[in-house]
Image (tube, grey):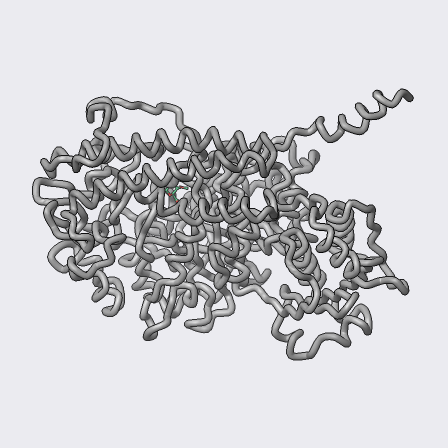
Amino acid sequence: MRKGLLIIFIILPALSRAEDGYDLWLRYNKISNTAILSQYKKQINSPVVFGSTQTVAIIRTELGRAFSGLTGTPFRILSSIDKASSFIAGISTSSAILSSIVTKDELIRIGKEGFIIKTRPGKTIITANTEIGVMYGVFHFLRLMQTYQPITGLSIVSAPKLKLRLLNHWDNLNRTVERGYAGFSIWDWHKLPDFIDKRYVDYARANASIGINGTVLTNVNANAVILTKPYLEKVKALADLFRPYGIKVYLTARFSAPIEIGKLRTADPINDTVQLWWQQKVKEIYELIPDFGGFLVKANSEGQPGPQDYNRTHADGANMLADAVAPFNGIVMWRAFVYSQTSNDRFKQAYEEFKPLDGKFKKNVLVQVKNGPIDFQPREPFSPLFGAMKQTPLMMEFQLTQEYLGQGTHLVFEVPMFKEVLNTDTYSKGKGSTVAKVVDGSLDNYSLNGMAGVSNIGNDINWCGHPFAQANWYSLGRLCWDHGLSSAQIADEWIRQTFSNDKSFVETVKKIMLQSHETLVNYMTPLGLTHIMYNGHHYGPMPWGNTLNRPDWNPVYYHKADSIGIGFDRTPTGTNALAQYSSEVQRQYDDIDKCPEDYLLWFHHVPWKHKMKSGRTLWDELCYKYYTGVDSIKAIQQQWNKMNKYIDPERFGHVAQLLGIQVKDAIWWRNACLLYFQTFSKMPIPAQYEKPDKTLEYYQNIRILYAPGN
Ligand code: GCV
């Protein structure tokens, strides 16, 4: 072969695949630092993994791929030890070497899913009580390698803080995804069970690598068809594939399924025939999927059927399903996202319906609560249900998909927002009763506990649409495993694995990510404004929205701007929603002069000339926040534009283009909101700011008819 031709053949494979983001944080690129590389090599010689199950095969494949990629030399993973072996993994009973380095106490501490990693000079030992635990340990070790951390002197004993670590897909059977901004559903129901998309395996790998152990496959706005035999066969195919990765499948149960697919005349939960129908249906599911996780249910909310249709309570409905799955160790996650029009304040609705039911749910029921009282807004105070239902395990529901956070086009790292909620003190059992402790069960002693993230995954080649949205998926797993991890730590490890370990790149991008949420809050809903997005699809501003049938679907309901001021009075002079919190929390918010300003308009109707902590009037502060938001996103754009030399042109360009949209959108948000609120305040935008270049009318006439996910 001629030399020139040879070069083309060598170069072509490298050029043939443009960087598309498909590999997520599991890239295993060759370590560029030679000192680190040679140190690592000593710890991973002749690697051996004991065992012969499917999970062990998965671990071997992953290690082979990772070690070969990271070192640039091919690795084969052995099943029995040889003289040179310096990397040894397996369950603790599989070899004397493994059992000798762990104590009984450590093995108890790690439980079924935790792991132990210990290193000695020239030896790495990873062990656990189960092979799934070994797998998590191996992924942890690979994370250390991918992020260039030391891998000597390790003594890690790690167990997940939460038992249920779940993704909730809002995926429909026709492959549309409610609030999905990354294409269609990855579940190709039409071709299942016979066609197994390679993506299902990569989905499982990615989840396993961050400790996610369950997936609810279907939308909470449920379709009963998923519970029919042909669809259960499809679900079985996915469950079989996910099992060796430690992932259980769950389904959403449509409450009226006994009528729709069972041909019964009622779905009343205390009707014997209905109960029998569910019991038989559950038996059918478990015959196919012996480790089926259970059901997630949205009932009597936004038009979904539920037990209240028969004058029964949420507890009656949940308990009927709980009884059906209990013999198989299944669980029911019953959502508290309800807001029928019986309350004078949507904020109060979930508490009013659920608090009286505390203690009435069966042992295998968790009530799944959104982080805030309304609906995944850019900033919400914690839902007052956290801390109020001491006799019921409450599962946290976060939304990864960015329905109210700029959807597929805005760069927002959500962890600071999640941590703000998790770290808030409910005072339900005195100081230190944080939301995190309610959720992880430590406050009220629940071993059944969990956290769910509404998935942001679709069939886009890079899984999540926006390259940075992958970080939010990644974060869910990491926070479920350890909600004590800081936002900076999670961002740092994600950046290093996903893009580059270059110090300047990591530091700049970490700063961008850590500022991104506050930046969005400032240009969308500062000072506690909420739900002023466009009707229906929720993309873009519509603070003037006032045409929908229900008052609480309209933005004007939430901001209540008038000639006096702006904001929702939830103190005793208003709806008194504050009374749903403990007295300590009430005291933090009830005084207009002391209320943290980030939450001010959530709890107070504030006069336009009210003096803020900065000394500005409320109106000037509102302007300041909106202008700061735009300035910050422009600064982020500039910082990103300097990152081209560190990473591939494809992902660099993708993010750069989206930041262009984000800057435009931020200006749109700022101008539209300020011009509209100005019609009430009648005060000028301070002279130092550039004036909006369009009229309010212009913004009010913008129509986005076909935003995705709607
Ligand atoms: C799945 C919001 C969303 C809906 C979603 C609902 C829920 O209202 O806009 O799309 O429905 O929350 O969480 O059930």
At 44% from the left and 63% from the top, the residue drawn is 439
Question: Compared to 294, does 355 lie above or below?
Answer: below
- Measured as percent of width and height from the top left, residue 598 is found at 27, 52
Q: Is residue 363 left or right of residue 15?
A: left
Q: Is residue 261 visible?
A: no
Q: How many marks?
A: 0
Name the residue located 85 percent from the left edge and 56 percent from the top edge.
78
Q: Position of residue 538 (x, y in %)?
A: 34, 35
Observer-nearest residue: 115 or 130?
Answer: 115
Task: Name the foreground residue: 139 vs 72.
Answer: 72
The image quadrant where one finds the N terminus is: top right
| Residue drawn at the location 54% of the way across and 52% of the way down | 492
Q: Position of residue 307 (x, y in %)?
A: 37, 51
Could you tell me which quadrant the C terminus lies in? top left
Q: Give the answer, above or below, for where 302 lies relative to 542.
A: below
Image check: 365 left or right of 115? left
At horizontal 32% and vertical 75% (from top left) the residue drawn is: 430
Q: Is residue 25 visible to us here?
A: yes
